[in-house]
Amino acid sequence: MNRRSFVHSAASAAAVTMLAGRPAAAQSKAKIKKAVGVGMLPDSLSLEDRFKLAAGVGFDGVEGATTEDPKQVEAIRSAAEKAGIRLHSVMNSNHWQFPLSSPKADDVKKGIEGMRTSLQNAHDWGADTVLLVPAVVNPQVRYVEAYERSQKHIREDLLPLAKELGVVIAVEEVWNKFLLSPIEFAKYVDEFDSPYLKAYFDVGNVVLYGYPQDWIRTLGKRIAKLHVKGFKRVDSGWQWTNVLDGDIDWKDVRKALDEIGYEGFMTAEVSGGDEAYLRDLSKRMDSIIAGTA
């Protein structure tokens, strides 16, 4: 083999090796499923009809809310099953009122009890994740206190139950003056060193001070679930918008999701509405998933 042939063969082999080692998500779009929050469905309908409506306009799943009444828990499970739609996650209901970062022991106790109820709801409904706002920084709670207290209570009071039930606790970045960069968010998750503690990433929540595609690439496989909403800068400041409206670069968001191989649920967190509104929202989300937004 002469030098030219050798160089050509080596280059071809290297190209094949690079392609073989490339993540599947980079070669083709990873499967993402659409969901809607239960509170976005018309409350004038019965539970079963609400879930049937969600399925009928194209959603694959519903994100439920913490429910304490055992009879209502069963009614929700049964209605979703009859409608043929999955309850894929649970939105914890009292993490703002009773944050794990609170200096008041009674508040923390109530917050832990609420999360335990949420974890049990998820298990009973066949959901695999519970969303948790892990802490709130305010004039009474320093950032370092929020960090240390929330990790302590999650690790000691919640993760054992999450592991027992097989449900992931997914902490979300939200306007709580906490976890303000993707690097810190990744560090916070990694310090638990547990498959039952991951990230719930909200695409719209970071646009004021960052770029969601950057956060997605940094968080990578730590992301268990996604929330989507629109965000728009206006003369008076900013406003929340419907999905696709506003300033988010949805094509690059989709590209970033492909790069990390994300294949979970994408749940809308916007205003609710009637069938026409929900059908339009479903189509908007289809365009994000297809990469044509």
Image: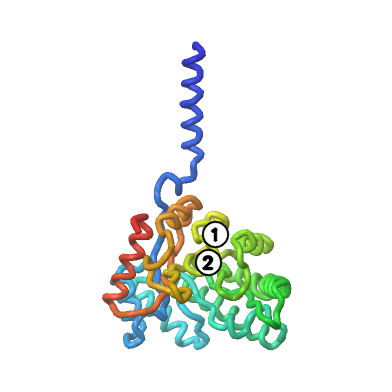
Q: Position of residue 52 (x, y in %)?
A: 31, 76
Specify the amino acid type for callout 1: Trp
The residue beneath circle 2 is 206
- Using residue 213 as the reference point, say whether residue 84 is left or right of it: left
Q: Is residue 270 visible?
A: yes
* x and y, in percent, of residue 208 in the image: 52, 68
Q: Is residue 166 visible?
A: no
Residue 215 disc label: 1
Q: Whole-percent x and y of residue 55?
A: 32, 71
User: CA separation, marks 1 and 2?
Assistant: 8 Å
Asked which secondary structure carries label 1, the reply is helix
Q: Position of residue 249 (x, y in %)?
A: 42, 59
Q: Where is the C terminus found, in terms of image quarters?
A: bottom left
| Residue farthest toward the left in the current orientation of the protein | 276
Q: Are marks 1 and 2 in contact (CB under 8 Å)?
A: yes
- Judged from this view, the residue extending furthest toward the top is 2
Q: Which mark is residue 16?
A: none
Q: Quadrant of residue 269?
A: bottom left
Left or right: 58 as drawn, with respect to 206: left
The residue lying at 41 percent from left, 83 percent from top is 75
Q: Residue at x 46, y 87 (%)?
A: 71
Q: Decide: few, some or many residues near mark 1? Use Cα within 10 Å; few <14, some 14-19, many ≥20.
A: many
Q: What residue is shown at x 56% (from left), y 81% (from top)?
A: 117
Question: What amino acid type is highlighted by mark number 2?
Answer: Val
First of labels 1, 2 by sequence position? 2
Element on which disc 2 rests = helix
Mark 2 neighbour density, 10 Å: few (under 14) some (14–19) many (20 or more): many
